[in-house]
Amino acid sequence: MWRRLPDREALSEAWRAAVRGLRQGLPLVFAVLGLVVVLTAVGVGYHFVASSPRFAVSRVEVLGNQRVPASALQSRVGLSAAVLGDAPGRNIFALDLGQMAETLEAEPWIEAATVRRRLPDAVVIEVEENQPVALVELDGLYLVDERGRVFARGQVERGDGAELPVITGIARDDYNAEPARTEARIRRAIEAVELYRERDGGDGAEARPRLGEIHIDNHSGITFFTFDTAMAVRIGHGSADVLRARLRAFDVAWRSLPREERAQVDVVYADLHERPDRVTMRFADAAGMSR
């Protein structure tokens, strides 16, 4: 049985269609090949940087620390000297810098931390330490910052807070039950300390006696205790301006006392609401004296 063959023009059209299809498909083929090449190169490059001893961490620089030893910070993030000495060492690109910073900030003395790479083989740790401004008695002495936040237990044997005033009058149970409210009371005490220290003798005026303790309670308000003689200076409740005025009244009365009489002062009452310009002093060997 005879079958009719396609004519020449039909064959030409079919050939042209095949060529057009090939031309249209070539870019996709080249794109796929290019992607394969790129991915292969990336894989080879990653394997190189992840395994090359050139990028093994061999140095750690710690900045900003004063209280916490650099070795302790390095150990906290797994970069102690012993670890750095191991071969082949930790690859610098395998480190989770964000997680390392969070780990450091979990330390009581660390307020903020950043960790960065310094290629090819160094890691830089920079920390900002908490700055204690006072100690607070909470069934033990604890360090507090300027925000009134308790951040570490004071290690007296190491000299923690040796020059800092001690805040008393705050119960540990209150702190545990209402930490935010208690921190506000601690801040109130810290603000009063700052008022007391405004007269430090730097302007040529006589400095106030060195402060040792500040007691705060709902009934009496603020009471200072001097470091050397434990003299009580009661300034009570009030705004910063009110407390500042009472301290100035104390200054006037204090300057009027001879040195030998100052050593005998037991309590200074500068919280007389009816006479804010007057100060009453109680002496250890007398019933009292007004100035």
Image (tube, rainbow, N blue to C red):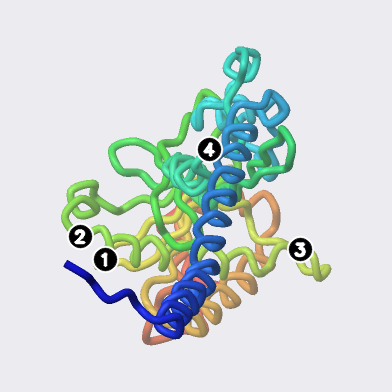
Camera-side mark, 3 or 2: 2
Find disc 2 in the rendering and name its residue. Answer: 178
Report the Cα–Cα distance between label 3 and label 2.
38 Å
Q: Is residue 148 above or below residue 203?
A: above
Q: Nearer the viewer, residue 2 or 13?
A: 2
Q: Is residue 46 above or below residue 2?
A: above
Find disc 3 in the rendering and name its residue. Answer: 201
Which amino acid type is marked by label 2? Glu
Camera-side mark, 2 or 4: 4
Report the Cα–Cα distance between label 2 and label 1.
5 Å
Q: Secondary structure at mark 2?
A: loop
Residue 14: x, y in percent?
42, 77
Which amino acid type is marked by label 3? Gly
Find disc 1 in the rendering and name its residue. Answer: 181
Which amino acid type is marked by label 1? Arg
Q: Nearer the viewer, residue 28 or 174?
A: 28
